[in-house]
Amino acid sequence: MRIVFCYWESIIDEKLSLTFENLGHEVLRFHEPFSDFDLDSSYVNKLANFLYDCETVNAVVSINYIPIVSKVCKIFRLPYLSWIVDCPCIPLYSETLPNPHNYVFIFDKLYAARFKSMYPDSNIFYLPSCHDVKLAENAIISDDDLEKYSCDVSFVGSLYSKESVYNSIEDKIPPYIRGYIEGLINAQCNVYGYNFISDSISDDMVREIMSAFGMTKKPGYISCDRDIAADYYIGYKCTERDRKNVLRAVSERFSLDLYTTGSPQDIPNARFRGIADSGTMLPKIFKCSKINLDIIHKSIQSAITVRTYDAMGLGGFVISNWQIEIPDYFTIDRDIVVYESIPDLLNKIDYYLTHDDERMQIAKNGQEKVLANHTYNIRVQEMLRLAGL
């Protein structure tokens, strides 16, 4: 087939476009940036002209959902395939989502079910994340790499100290609501595998949060204030709190290498290593760390993250917080280890740091299962099957 790939500026863009090529399809890359994914007439005109000049096109593809691409594909009567890899993904609330030419694939089972329930007759599907086998090319470990990246426990990811927008609006929220949200965040930090934030905030609380941020309903969108308040504002703050709590506890008992943009003052006992380049450094970190710790963003309702798949696919040993999709694909304590509380995590780190054979066998089992069942080739073939292409 002939595929036009619209770039979102995601690190997954090129991985996905290359996969289509590896499967024998021709990929025409459309690299134009958009200033607004709903209203950018220049982008619309350029994409329309690009499609017209291509003459024969079988489908348009992107990472995440771009409403203006959907509008153009509707005019051209072209299938538009978008794979959602972020949660929350605000463009999904666009009124264009149920367009008949859309084929929307969402990496999180519960998040996919949310939108499928809104539009039961639409082409919305669950399609989990996966591992990039090409990362193995950058995972050849030298003696220098062993010295540089070897550690007992590592964590790669944001601490969300700056990204948590709730921090900027907190003082604008009435004290009684602020106190309730504080308690809600603390409670959610102690629960893994079930997100109850949205169900636990009243309509008045939602209005106060949205008003504090100056957020109003966007034209062409369905109402999504509750989801934005829960997943974006409170969810990011909850993730910040959860990660700092977990990492402080781990660093107080074990040697912890932290790859993040955060401040060393946040986790004073950790060894801050800066940002990890996803192409060159990350594969070596996964392979050289005895334990790769995954603390999944609280707004991700049920899914396994790309980082987990990549660490396992490279033969890394992973301890992740409990997510309901993990037992759908992996055997707990055989392919991957999960924790359900901070004390549980500390006990498991202590155990697996002193049981090398078990740890390495679990890493081997997990790698074999990922490489056999969870690669980009497998996901794209499933995507095309579901889209009838």
Image (cartoon, rainbow, N blue to C red):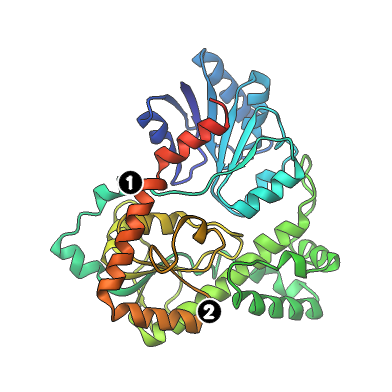
Q: Position of residue 117 (x, y in %)?
A: 74, 46
Q: In the structure shown, which secondary structural element does the residue marked by tag 2 occupy?
A: loop
Please give left or right for residue 228 compared with residue 136 in the image. Answer: right
Please give left or right for residue 274 compared with residue 1 in the image. Answer: left
Residue 278 visible (yes or no): no
Circle 1 packing at 10 Å, graded few (<14), some (14-19), many (20+), is some
Asked if residue 154 is positioned above or below residue 175 in the image, the reply reads above
Q: Residue at x 44, y 48 (%)?
A: 130
Q: Position of residue 239 (x, y in %)?
A: 57, 69
The residue nearer to you, when weighing 133 against 33, is 133
Q: In the rendered structure, which amino acid carries the disc numbered 2?
A: Ser
Disc sitting over residue 133 in the figure: 1
| Residue that sits furthest to the top in the current view | 55
Q: Position of residue 71 (x, y in %)?
A: 68, 28
Residue 60 visible (yes or no): yes
| Residue that sits furthest to the right in the current view | 204
> Residue 156 lies in what quarter of the image?
bottom left
Asked if residue 114 is positioned above or below residue 26 in the image, the reply reads below
Asked if residue 220 is positioned above or below residue 276 in the image, the reply reads above
Q: In the rendered structure, which amino acid carries the disc numbered 1?
A: Val
Q: In the structure shown, which secondary structural element does the residue marked by tag 1 occupy?
A: helix
Please give left or right for residue 131 compared with residue 299 in the image. Answer: left
The residue nearer to you, when weighing 344 against 14, is 344
Q: CA distance from mark 2 to mark 1?
A: 32 Å
First of labels 2, 1 by sequence position:
1
> Which residue is identified by label 2?
341
Q: Residue at x 70, y 76 (%)?
A: 184
Q: Position of residue 212 (x, y in %)?
A: 77, 65
| Residue that sits furthest to the bottom in the current view | 252
